[in-house]
Amino acid sequence: MPQDERGPGAELVRPRARRGGGRPTIADVALRAGVGAITVSRALREPGRVSPELRRQVAAAIAELGYVPDRNARALASARADVIGVLVPSLTNNVFAEVVRGIYDGLGDSHLQVQIGNTHYSGLEEERLLQVFLSQRPSALIVSGIDQTLAARALLENAGCPVVQIMETGPDPVDMMIGFSHFDGGRAAARHLAEAGYRNIGFIGARMDPRSQRRLAGYRAAMEEAGIFDPRLVTTTTVPSSVSLGRDLLREARAKMPALDAVFCNNDDLALGVLFECHGVGLAVPSTIGIAGFNDLEMMQAAFPSITSVRTHRYEIGRRAVSMARAAISGERPPQRMVDVGFELMPRESTKRAR
Amino acid sequence: MPQDERGPGAELVRPRARRGGGRPTIADVALRAGVGAITVSRALREPGRVSPELRRQVAAAIAELGYVPDRNARALASARADVIGVLVPSLTNNVFAEVVRGIYDGLGDSHLQVQIGNTHYSGLEEERLLQVFLSQRPSALIVSGIDQTLAARALLENAGCPVVQIMETGPDPVDMMIGFSHFDGGRAAARHLAEAGYRNIGFIGARMDPRSQRRLAGYRAAMEEAGIFDPRLVTTTTVPSSVSLGRDLLREARAKMPALDAVFCNNDDLALGVLFECHGVGLAVPSTIGIAGFNDLEMMQAAFPSITSVRTHRYEIGRRAVSMARAAISGERPPQRMVDVGFELMPRESTKRAR
DNA sequence: AGTAATTATGGTAGCGCTACCATTACGGGC
DNA sequence: GCCCGTAATGGTAGCGCTACCATAATTACT
């Protein structure tokens, strides 16, 4: 007889193995603490509603068992996942990377998780991701921009959770909104160049998503105010932005308009490329050509010469968007549904034309 | 009698309102399609096991009702969320932003979602996030580096799901691993500078996380091989990297070692700062001073002069890490548990010393 | 003192899905 | 023709938690 004698029936009698893999559940904790399961649940979510005595017992039992609540079960039972869905058009674009960092930092010690979707600047992809996110019943949604498709907008309006649109301000928010005016930012940069004494001020733009378009519109407005607008000054492409592309576009712009004496770049990557191109072909900055960028990445002030740019408050937008979402989740709708965080023109060497 | 006559008992008889908010469930779809609920579930997850006939009926019912599966219920029932947890030390560091982009692109049309945690280069934070992630029973985990704390390593080993360590290679993987040798990368860059004829080759490093340390070790090995190592050539700080910091560190390095004729920078941001500092103080690059960076960001080749760097395959690492994870999730352990994607030295103008 | 309001706790019944097993239909090997 | 393996489908019983209601034990108030 083998030692491992269990009899042929043992297999049949054995209770079905626990599906979940044997992790302790709330029932185990309740048993150990000598309380009901619901009291454990409450001790975790609303400690104020449980007596200090029981709270201690529960905490001890949790520690002894190494209990970790199952987020999936919680989400199913409460019909709400502790997740904030975030949609951004790009993950590698430094601007959105900082927004995302602000979002993460804005979570603080809340139990919320972030789920990021990358729309690749595509409205259809945004719709698809919205569907996916909604299937989790998120606690809130943060979406970039104000140019959602009709279908996406409908999804947002029926999301059943707070929604924050970020990075731009505009009329008719779905719910809440925090950002700034790209039009005004573009206009401020262009005005600055005009005031510095430049006359043939070009615009260089890549990608040309809706926000870029509005910066271009702001540039145009400033140029027309000064009576120096000329369509040949505008050089754009839908190709994604890069430093090399900045070099290429400056070459293209100068070929078209040899008299060009300044450029306002859609973003700082292009501005850096423009600076390198000037170095490469021996154009003096700022005396022969002025350069202004947009976003004010850290490197703008370290460049030589330092580059004028429009500082945007990306990190702050991320943080405050989460604050607004958290407030709304707790039921307290913030007084301001629409927040304009503005921008700041940072004049530097690259636009100091000697008069 | 009021019109709205329901009798006092109506309130008690009324079936309890559906908790979930009235979204159609799998049972609704099953009813409509005239099949069992389980068949709907299978039609969605393993279409091959359902007859084409029923599959069509189910698809039609889903479309008519606008059914969207509840991910939370699925996760609870199957004890597995369709989520890949990703831990990175930084979200704004361009290198990790590209890894993350590769990860997202690697998902393809799978039903997987990504959950990103930002460890801020902290082992303790990594532990905490691992706990949070594990409470969702993720399908796989991707973690950066090989320097986990003991506790974090234990969590990973008992995670009960595939684990991929990325960005580095090293002995003793938890499960799978994909990356490259930072030591070899650092050594290759330093050797290149020595072979180009530079003699007083400095090292400039920021943050000095474990990967930076290994690059420094590689640099040192190359210097000792060439018999030109001097500890005064090394300038580091634990401050996070930036372009401005590159300028500062070059000033510091030159103050310490006026004979400095080349620098290998920990990363490309610093290298760019070094270039600007050289422009600022009128040092000729590459004749008076040579510059090499690490990672080969796009701007390196667009810079003037273009900057030598060590190209790392960040996007590819992200993509392939997901492939490996997906393979493991499907049960097919990939033949290679450890993948070294290598790196590529990109010699450019900034190290072309005229002999 | 008696009643209502409040607090603290527990029991029950799901949330919407899938694992597991049972059942049926069909074809092939003997 | 019978048995058995295979494929296709369904029923049942949870997964681990929380909403909802019930109950008991207080406190507040008339």
Image (spheres, coloured by chain):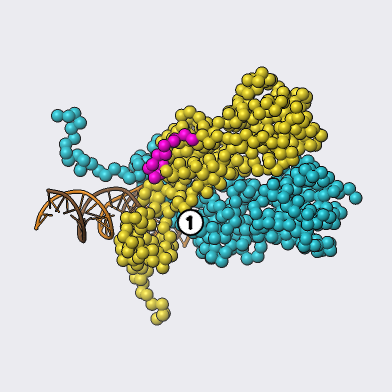
Chain colours: A cyan, B yellow, C brown, D orange
Relative horizontal placement of residue B327, taking residue A350 as reference (left or right): left
Residue B284 lies in what quarter of the image?
top right
Q: How crowded is mark 1: few (under 14 residues within 10 Å), some or many (20 or more)?
A: some
Q: Where is residue B142 shown, x and y percent of the image?
A: 49, 40
Q: Residue B305, located in which quarter of the rendered image?
A: top right
Of the 4 image quadrants, the one containing the C terminus of chain B is top right
Residue A226 place in picture, x, y as percent = 84, 62
Quadrant into which the N terminus of chain B falls? bottom left
Instruction: Judge left or right: residue A151 versus residue A73.
Output: right
Q: Position of residue D19 (x, y in %)?
A: 42, 57
In this view, which residue lies farthest toward the front?
Answer: B355
Q: Does dot 1 land on a helix, a strand or a loop?
A: helix
Q: Residue at x 59, y 56 (%)?
A: A121
Image-based side of B255 in relation to A60, left or right? right
Residue bearing mark 1: A132
Tell me where the magenta segment starts and ends, as one range: B328-339
The answer to whether B177 is drawn above or below residue B76 in the figure is: above
Residue A330 in sight here: no
